[in-house]
Amino acid sequence: MKDITYLTNNGVDVETGIELLGDIETYKETLLEFLNLADGKINNLKMTKDNDLENYSVFAHSIKSDARYLGFIKLSEIALNHETQAKAGNKEYVNSTFDSFINEINKAKEIAKSFLGSYAEKQVVSSTQVITDSTKAVLIVDDSEIIRDFLFKILGSEYECIMADDGKKAIEILESDEKDRIKAMFLDLNMPNFNGFDVLDYFKEKNLFEKYPISIITGSDDKDSIDRAFKYPIIDMLVKPFNEKDVKRIVERTISFKR
């Protein structure tokens, strides 16, 4: 494995990444997850760029969040531009700059692979595979496996962490929660197919906000989206990129909230 100066020499803001993720070991594990998931994310972009800009913007958003956590500044900026332009329906921009977007992702992959060296052979246990025996469960709903795993690392020793990668799966989990183990929910707004606002509308229709306190996870700095979210009786909002201190503060407030 190379020294972290290799990352800084290649334009990676590794100090901010370590600050957000807590320590160098967590940073390395998160970088490895990014490396393992990158090809799948590239494939998602390729599949949606021509006929599904709505979901394309969500996949670009996911890459933006990952890049911000890891300190890949240029990649996060390019991904943000693609997210914004896709939301605006600007197919011409998406197609004309698509190759440079993919090239930047591949560049980040090569930097990660070179930095990690033999560490890249390590297998990281996904949070979706680990369930603790607890009567206190939190439901984490986010399409980014990196975000889900990061939250699990912070919360998994104290709470059972139940994971969903989209809104429909989250609702299925809640409907099967016969023993009322789930004490709180952390919900991403930007997900493909069935997004966070769809879940919030479902909660409003079924009158579930008192039973399951919700705090929002978002990487959006769109004021309209944030204002729209706070029209629902949510508890608080985690804005990506967030750190361990932010998560612990909001999880305590959410779980202990009494209406």
Image (spheres, rainbow, N blue to C red):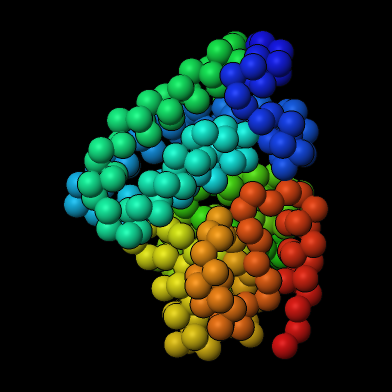
Q: Nearer the viewer, residue 28 or 60?
A: 60
**Which residue occupies the foreground of this view, 77 or 249?**
77
Report the residue at 69% width, 29% height from top. Answer: 14
> Is residue 157 visible to the viewer in this orientation of the structure?
yes
Q: Quadrant of the C terminus?
A: bottom right
Determine the residue positioned at 79% across, 66% down: 252
Q: Is residue 216 above or below residue 96?
A: below
Who's the residue at 50% across and 81% down the image? Answer: 203
Q: Is residue 252 above or below residue 90?
A: below
Q: Position of residue 41 (x, y in %)?
A: 39, 38
Number of numbered labels in the structure image: 0
Say which residue appears at 19% left-offset and 52% top-offset. 51
Q: In the picture, residue 79 is in which quadrant?
A: top left
* Position of residue 165 measured from the top left corner of the image (x, y, whole percent): 46, 54
Q: Is residue 131 left or right of residue 45?
A: right
Question: In the shown orientation, is residue 74 left or right of residue 157?
Answer: left
The answer, for residue 182, to whether it is visible in the render is: no
On screen, residue 160 above or below 119: below
Within the image, what quadrant is residue 10 found in? top right
Instruction: Pick the quarter of the image with the N terminus.
Output: top right
Residue furthest to the left in view is 51
